[in-house]
Amino acid sequence: MKKLIIFLTATVMLYSCNKFEDTNVSPALLTEASTKALLTNSLQAMSSLSLGNTAASRLGAMYIQHLSEGPYPGPSLYNDRNLSFSTWYTGPLYDLETIINYNNAGSKSANGNGSKNNQIGVARILKAYYYLLMTDKWGNIPYFDALKGSTSYSPVYDGQQAIYTDLFKEFTEASAQVTSAEAKVEGDVMLNGDMNAWKRFANTMRMVMALRLSVKDAVKGKTEYTAALAAGVITSNAQNVNYSFLAGDPNNYNPWYNNYSVSNRNDYAISKTLTDYMDTKSDPRLPIYAEVLAGNIIKGLPYGRNVAVNIPAAYSRIGNYFRAAGAKMPLMNYAQVLFMRAEAAKIGYEVGGDAQAAIFYLDAIKASMEQYGVYTLAAYNAYIALPGVLYVPATGYSQIMSEKWVHMYLNSWETWNDWRRTGFPVLTPAIDAIDPRGIPKRLGYPTTEAALNGTNYNAAVTAQGGTDDNYAKMWWLP
Amino acid sequence: MLEYGADESWGPKMDGSQYRPYYSWYPGSEFGQLSALTPQPDNVKNFFNTGINLNNSIAFTTGGESHNLRLTYGNQDRTLIIPEARRQQHQIGLNGSFDVGKYLTLSSDIAYTTSFTKGQPEEGYRLDGLNVMQNFNQWFQRQLDIEKMKQYREPDGSLNSWNIGDPNASSDLAVYGKPQYWDNPYFVVKENYGTRNHNRLVGNVGLNIKINKHLNLQSYARLNSYTNENDFSVATGGLQLDAFSINQNQYRELNYETNLTYKNKFGDFSVDGLIGANKRRERYSQLSESTAGGLSSPNYFDIAASIARPNISRSYTNKVVNSIYGKASVGWRDMVYLEGTIRNDWSSALPEEENSYNYPSASLSFVFTELLRKTSVYNWLTYGKIRASYASVGSDLGAHSLDIAINNGSFYGTNPSATIGNQFRGGGIRPALTKAWEVGAELRFFKKFGIDFTIYQNNNTDQILAVDVSPASGFTTAQINAGSIVSKGVEITLNGNAIQSKNFSWDITMNWAKNRNEIRELAPGINTYLYATNRFDTRLEHPVGGEWGTYYGRKWKVNAKGETVILSNGQPDYTIGEKIGTVLPKWTGGIFNSFRYKGFDLTFSIDFQKGGLFYSETRNFNTGAGLSQETVGVNDKGFDWRDYPGAYTLAGGNTGNGGIRIPGAFADGTPNNRYISARSYWYTARQKDAREVLLDASYIKLRDIRLGYNLPTALLQKTKIAKTANIGVIVQNAWLISAEAKKYGIDPSELEVFYREGGQLSATRQIGINLRVGF
């Protein structure tokens, strides 16, 4: 009998050798993600990529001298040459691409998460936004050939001009595609499904790009600028685009809070370059920007020295407005738009010349003070009457850009773009700069690209002057 | 005053002058006291303990004509060199068999192990301060006395640290006394640690039916299972947010195996055969939970203490592999053996249309000296065998890994968050196949000396790999069937009985091996296998058609004349992606000696490696932070390079005498005349050349040595209990005789992984006493 059982068992087993039914299906894994969850993740990525959650994302604040470093000077001495772009592509960009793909394929994962137009439109706007941040850092990057998985494991690098042309198109088309007449997007933790806000955001970004062309192609720049303005940009502080962090949720804390208060690292203080500028003017925004130390003083940390310095109690860290657990991060706001319009008037994108530039400039300062909650008529009047602040046509361009630099505190990457384009404010590079060529003009590519995408990488480096370092020129510079 | 907050050692000369140590800033009897500024050579000795490993085991056996039974018990109690780290383990084993009637034998074998581990140290380069090793060779100050740190709490219970803030900036102890980047290492090891409870049950039940003289039917059910519970506590009050995490997992593997075996002899021929089938079922599940946002009460180590929603993740795998197989072997006059096998597997982890794979093997051996027995050759060539084999092995991949993963992000409020996984999986994965060829020979001369050599080549086709691709594709890795990866090599072993007399003997064995790997083909569009990346743009690659295990990294830039190109600030310019060398050793080998004199026996083994590179995080920061001795010295002007180099002008050079000048030339070709500070050199400039941290892995090591003594049987007979007794002293990891990296304090024979070390717990020399008694 036993023999028989064993024989039968063996026989039954052999007959069913290659059939496993759902053994390889894990109950703990999904095969498709809901598009609303992908959108949320794409927005959450901002804190790590552009707003200061990683060392690389903080470089802009060092380059533009919003911040100085304490015990471990490195980035502020321009020690970081080659930076990874991996998480940009594999994180938000591919997730946004997937939202578009799911919607186009009619996947059920897109159901109930907003109309197809709105889901695709928002994904395109965000994709264009991330790509714009990237190309302004690295120059030529994989764009048309990117995000294609096995179709192209080593994508071609595209020239910045071609990327800019396509991004203009994307912002324009996507802005027209989103509509408040259809179901709003779900999972939108930044603009809460306000489709008109997405339109304004796209148009304002198009305006940013148009100004970027001021020295390279002012004709196209002016055309795009005028169209963007007509399409509707941010027109009040109530329409500002911010990314909000959550005070009660450690996974959604403000990145500066994480750094200072969770990791207990005191690596950064406000730069003396900035406090020197603001202190002499008794700028009411300074106590918002910087920690007020015992004795009611604000002390900026000297910039760019290769000396390890202890920060707590000795120098002012970032102010609570920016580094509380739930502090929001500004992406795009009304004062910024007004500064752009002031510049536009100054360079002839808008009519009115210096007289109109001065009006926009003063409105921008007012909007800035209002945004930071320090506006009083008396303080504002005192401030704008100060020599140096008082608009003078001969120094107007520098004044607009310097005041914008102050306003854009910790929104540093965009300020870096402005500085590279206009040369304002005039900044002195780190005294102990590791590279004597001074403040970086570009980020180097991740060094692994030489191994993983060698041919295209080499072509891109050659196209930009032959050396993959921090000093190759953006296409939009002369 | 010292920069207490700095965790580097570039401060004032340690010449015995008086300074205020960090502890003199804490209230108490030592407040305000001065101390001599001197280096502390005994910190390592004082911090680490001697780990003790006690190992006991006992076995009882009984048996009779139709049954036998064996019961074993063992326990281990082990402490590590890190204070507080300890493991206790118990094992119980029971096995036995009995015959039921004439044809049926039942057997079973069960072993149960339970262990508890506390304080397994954290290793590797970490930013959270939990690897205290980093305080010895990466980030520290050399005048600090570890003995002083033992009292890591002040009398009022608050924590102290050597890495305090700046007492000049604030007179408030709560401000300046707050550690900057490092807690007291004793606080770390005594209050921040993990525990692990591990239970393992391994066993089988089986039966053997003797059908006739030649045929046997065997059937077994085998079990391998374990459960684990790990936790980790981060205590309240330190630099890290207090936290608790727990991870529970369980694994169970069951194999059901049935074999029919055949054995017979036909004249000079002996025949063995087997056919069988096996079903393997693996199941694993894990639940991990960790607190978020801190603990609700100080040192309340529980998930319930989580301030915010705790992080929870689950993983699960389930896999079945079915197999049928057969084996046949034929022997002729104990001289020639020929064997062949065939096996087919079906795996649930593979795509259904590609889930079957078969793999045969064949081997032949020939003891040719059997034919020479009557010739004179046999006088000196007393044994000779040649062998050749071909074996193939098919394999699958892990369960549930055919689709692109969807990973959960962190909820934003009530909004779920998800991201597409970073490994591209396009389906169409096939089983992998390794085909291995081997030929070898074994020869003995004069019944005293022997040589054994082997040449092998393994051809791996369709190996299932996750290789790095350009992240611009949207993915960091691609799951592929790698076209062709080949490894080949030579192994030679010499052994001999050098001396043999009544009271003294000496046996020696030497081996030597050389191995080469080559990637011939990966997948379309992928022409390198990026294996690893390290700090400062250093990367390890296996390029297709190139040298396997090539390290690339930065190099100081050189001009046409071969001089280092120096920037106007005295720093070297550098290039990236330069080839540095290979991780693969040229060859490896070992020597084993055994001496016997009367009742004493002495054995020892030496092993060695020639060539190969490894990345050293220890040297990187040991020099960068000014901790190691090589960072102290005089410059080419004969002055202490740690002195201030002074202001610099191109025409006049430096005003001071200190600093280091890197030999080289400025861009215009004029010689570099600029001295930079010691830290700028050791920390900054040296990060620009990977040759500083990619070190030669060659070494010669006395691996272990054992001295034993057999108690005289005459003596033992008197005890009337024991029949044999041997007492031995063993030293393991005895002595790093020589290594290129030894002068940097690094042992290349004890790397964390084959291509790098990142500040792991030091390897230790182990000394053991061993008593074997036979009853």
Image (cartoon, helix red, strand yellow):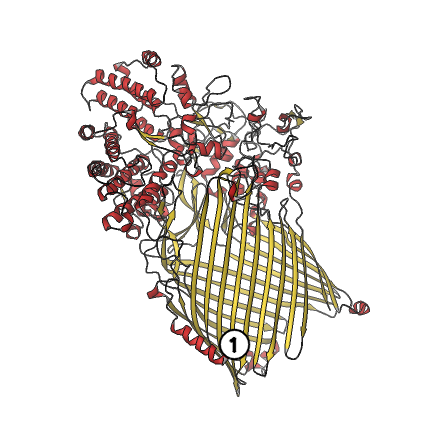
Q: Mark 1 lies on which chain?
A: B
Q: Mark 1 points at which residue?
A: B218
Q: Which amino acid does label 1 sit on?
A: Gln
User: On the image, which quarter does residue B6 sit in?
Assistant: top right
Where's residue A7, x and y in %? 45, 78
Where's residue B686, x and y in %? 48, 37
Depth check: A471 or A130 in front? A130
Say which element carries label 1: strand
Question: From the viewer's perspective, is A335 left or right of A78?
Answer: left
> Does residue A3 appear in the picture of this structure?
yes
> Does residue B566 appear in the picture of this structure?
no
Where's residue B75, x and y in %? 65, 58
Question: From the viewer's perspective, is B303 left or right of B775?
Answer: left
The relative height of residue B679 versus residue B314 in the rendered view (above or below) is: above
The relative height of residue B24 versus residue B535 in the rendered view (above or below) is: above
Crowding near pointer 1: few (<14 within 10 Å), some, many (20+)?
many
- Tell me the quarter of the image containing the C terminus of chain A: top left
